[in-house]
Amino acid sequence: MVHPGADPLQRALRERGCRSDREFETALREIEAEVQRRKQLIHQSVERKAVISKCYKQKHPEVYVLQDSFLAPDFLEIVRYCTSPDADLHGLLRYIESFSDKRIYRLPVFTEEFCQAFVDELENFEQSDMPKGRPNSMNNYGVLLNELGMDETFITPLREKYLRPITALLYPDLGGSCLDSHKAFVVKYSLHEDLDLSSHYDNAEVTLNVSLGKDFTEGNLYFGDFNQDPAPVPKYIEIEHVGAHGLLHRGGQIHGALPIASGERWNLIVWMRSSTIRNQLCPMCNKKPELVEAEGFGDGFTESNEDDVPETVDLCSLW
């Protein structure tokens, strides 16, 4: 039982099992420490990016600038259809693979030759003595692509020119036509490192997950319910990774990765965000966002400046 006058944090902690003052104080210290850690993340990332830009010797410089030759011919055909005057969802679904009613879609994205060169570049970076940030709190191995210098020349044009025409048809209710920022990273799974990924949902409106290789067995993705509409007994479906192909899904779709049984797997993950959507409701705390200033894309929220021109540079302070 929580006193009606208790502050929201105390009420939330009590509802989650804090029964004594000591338990509450311990939890509060942990929360405060995590808040401070998160506040430092962006500054640390900027420092790492500067060092990498100055000191890292690229093995495959060509992979840093997106070119049509990196993209699968079938993917380019899909984009051509989506940018045609008569494009609609029904027509697009003839080009891509759809799974159940969960709005999960598979499509070719890259050529195998590009995937091999890209993974080789990532391995070269991993073996270097450069400072490395990790993708998120759940993945211990992988690369933040903005720190590697790939945002402006690779991921942004991929999102704006190629992916947005597709997501505009697949996810109009999630801002698919106005995905104006992203967080992009590569995750790595191997037998002696991360094997799997537990259930979660993404800080994104739409997620692209591309299997880059290498050779591996098992490790299917599984998908459950949408995070805001859980069923009493969730129904999960498994989807197999296909090399050089990507899965598009709603960021709020609960999902995870089953353990790999052998080999090594690298996946490109692009969390795509629409400030039009998330300015109304933070997808992580499900509240109207209260913003604090950030660098770069931040978490994809916007706040108008003096000239009333929105910039995607803010974070929700509530989570």
Image: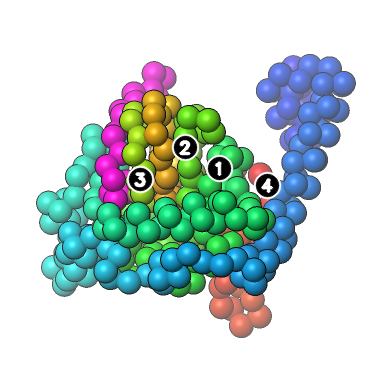
Q: Does residue 70 appear to the left or right of 85 in the view shown?
A: right
Residue beneath disc 2: 189
Decide: few, some or many residues near mark 1? Use Cα within 10 Å; few <14, some 14-19, many ≥20: some
Residue at mark 1 to residue at mark 2: CA–CA distance: 7 Å
Q: CA distance from mark 1 to mark 3?
A: 15 Å
Are dots 4 and 1 in contact, CB under 8 Å?
no
Q: From the image, tell me which residue sits under label 3.
A: 213
In the image, residue 60 lies at what x, y percent?
A: 44, 66
At mark 1, the secondary structure is loop
On whether residue 282 falls in the magenta region, the answer is no
The image position of residue 3, as x and y in percent, is 79, 24
Main secondary-structure element of the magenta-colored stretch: loop
Report the magenta residues as a range: 228-247
What residue did someone put label 1 on? 141
69 and 161: which one is in front?
69
Residue at the (36%, 43%) spot, across then down = 214
Left or right, residue 107 beside residue 274: left
Q: How many marks?
A: 4
State the separation of the CA atoms marked 2 and 3: 10 Å
Label ID, residue 318: 4
Amino acid type of the residue that numbered disc 3 sits on in the rendered structure: Gly
Quadrant of the image occupied by residue 279: bottom right
